[in-house]
């Protein structure tokens, strides 16, 4: 697949969002981390961290707790080197068995090579009955 780099068009921004959705649904933290710069800065809810190794550790821990993870991302807006998305994902808590649907927004900034250098995420978790799952 051709590398998607800024400046983004509506088409390339949508491709970048789909590539991110596909990568995250793989639940392969090493693979996902390669989409980010070595010093990528993240805010994920109340956590702030920097770098690919921290990303790998965060995602590995996340997917050990969030079973049956299934994500959908939707392009919200874009500029030359920034993309905003809204997302939903569903998962089952590994310890309690409770199902959740998480709703949120992400704001991304990319370097000239198309790697994400900033990821800013806000989200809320809603308890759901397993029978109410969408994905």
Image: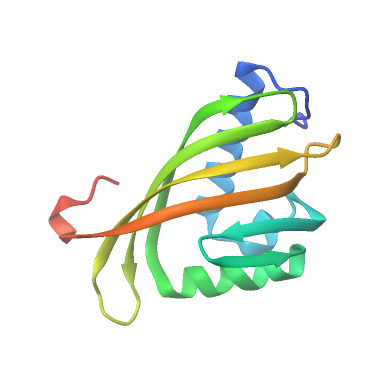
Q: Nearer the viewer, residue 47 or 34?
A: 47
* Residue beneath the point at 52% across and 36% down: 85
Counting the numbered discs, the total is: 0
Quadrant of the frame with the N terminus: top right
* Residue beneath the point at 65% across and 50% down: 119
User: Would you identify the image quadrant in which residue 128 lies?
Assistant: bottom left
Q: Residue furthest bottom?
A: 95
Q: Nearer the viewer, residue 38 or 44?
A: 44
Q: Residue furthest right?
A: 112
What colour-coding does the image apply?
Answer: rainbow
* Residue beneath the point at 25% across and 64% down: 99
Q: Is residue 67 left or right of residue 50?
A: left
* Residue beneath the point at 78% across and 29% down: 5
User: Would you identify the image quadrant in which residue 47 lies?
Assistant: bottom right
Q: Nearer the viewer, residue 23 or 38?
A: 38
Horizontal and vertical percent for residue 20?
59, 43
Looking at the image, residue 125 lies above or below residue 117: below
Q: Is residue 66 left or right of residue 60?
A: left
Looking at the image, residue 36 lies above or below residue 109: below
Horizontal and vertical percent for residue 2?
76, 29
Q: Nearer the viewer, residue 97 or 43?
A: 43
Q: Is residue 133 left or right of residue 21?
A: left
Looking at the image, residue 65 lies above or below residue 86: below
Horizontal and vertical percent for residue 102?
35, 54
Looking at the image, residue 72 lies above or below residue 69: above
Horizontal and vertical percent for residue 83?
62, 33
């Amino acid at each position: 697949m051709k590398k998607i780099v800024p400046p983004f068009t509506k088409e390339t921004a949508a491709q970048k969002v789909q590539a991110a959705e596909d990568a995250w649904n793989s639940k392969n933290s090493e693979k996902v981390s390669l989409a980010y710069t070595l010093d990528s800065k993240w805010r994920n809810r109340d956590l702030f961290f920097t770098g690919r190794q921290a990303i790998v550790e965060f995602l590995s821990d996340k997917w050990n707790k969030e079973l049956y993870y299934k994500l959908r991302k939707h392009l919200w807006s874009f500029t030359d080197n920034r993309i905003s998305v809204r997302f939903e994902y569903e998962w089952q808590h590994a310890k309690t068995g409770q199902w959740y649907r998480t709703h949120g927004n992400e704001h991304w900034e990319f370097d000239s090579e198309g790697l994400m250098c900033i990821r800013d995420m806000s989200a809320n978790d809603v308890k759901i009955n397993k029978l109410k799952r969408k994905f």
